[in-house]
Image (cartoon, rainbow, N blue to C red):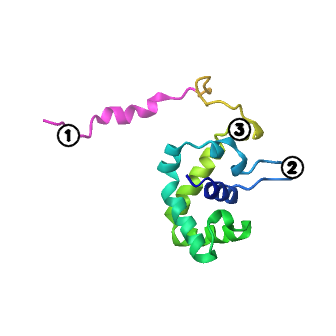
Amino acid sequence: MDQDALLAFVDTIIPAGGGAYPMPSAAAVEVFRAMSADEYDTHWRACLTVVDQEAISRYGGGLAALTPAERTALIEELQRAEPRVIKALIVRTVSLYYMDDLVMTLVGMEARAPYPQGNTVPETDWSILDPVKQRGGTWRKAN
């Protein structure tokens, strides 16, 4: 696992916030520092390899060796050239960041899963489904 490239990437996507709402960078939260090899192989390895190789070809060093400005420029260029690769990494970064206990606490939420304690769901008018029920099945039956 290329931990340095991973932390450089996530730090570029979510840098530390200052001012009235100090938030840790994504590289500072535990979920990225303690990532399993399986998580890395499944969601990160292929895409980060593309980014790291591009950093080497353009700047002569891997992603972790670049300055924050160079990393930002590279990622923005790759987002235009390879949007699916970069989007996959950004979505995963944001998803994991906002599941971290520290981040959840800092944004004012309990550091727990939304269920088992559950959330209150208002009662609804189930009669709105009557037209669908009356229509019956729209599939063909298998033999």
Disc 3 vs disc 2: Cβ atoms closer than 8 Å? no
Q: Measure how far apart labels 1 and 3 are at the Cα level.
A: 47 Å
Q: Element under label 2?
A: loop
Instruction: Examine the structure image and report whether residue 25 is included in the region drawn in magenta.
Output: no
Task: Identify the residue at horizontal 64%, vertical 75% (top origin).
Answer: 59
Q: Amino acid at mark 1?
A: Arg
Up/down of 96 relative to 128, above or below: below
For label 2, the crowd category at 10 Å Cα-Cα, with few meaning under 14, some 14 to 19 and many 20 or more, is few
Q: Amino acid at mark 3?
A: Met
Residue 39 is left or right of residue 104, and the answer is left
Q: Element under label 3?
A: helix
Picture quadrant where residue 77 is located = bottom right
Residue identified by numbered label 2: 20
Instruction: Give the mark, 2 or 1, whose residue is nearer the N terminus.
Output: 2
Q: Which mark is residue 140?
A: 1
**64 and 143: which one is in front?**
64
Measured as percent of width and height from the top left, residue 109 is found at: 72, 34
**87 and 62: which one is in front?**
62
Task: Identify the residue at horizontal 57%, vertical 65% (top origin).
Answer: 52
Please state the total of marks drawn on the protein image: 3
Measured as percent of width and height from the top left, residue 131 is found at: 37, 35
Q: Amino acid at mark 2?
A: Ala
Residue identified by numbered label 3: 104
Q: Which residues are magenta?
A: 123-143
Q: Measure how far apart labels 3 and 2 are at the Cα level.
A: 17 Å
Q: Residue furthest bottom?
A: 58
Disc 2 vs disc 1: Cβ atoms closer than 8 Å? no
Instruction: Give the mark, 1 or 3, whose residue is nearer the N terminus.
Output: 3
Task: Identify the residue at horizontal 82%, vertical 48% (top origin).
Answer: 22
Q: Which mark is residue 84?
A: none
Q: Element under label 1?
A: loop
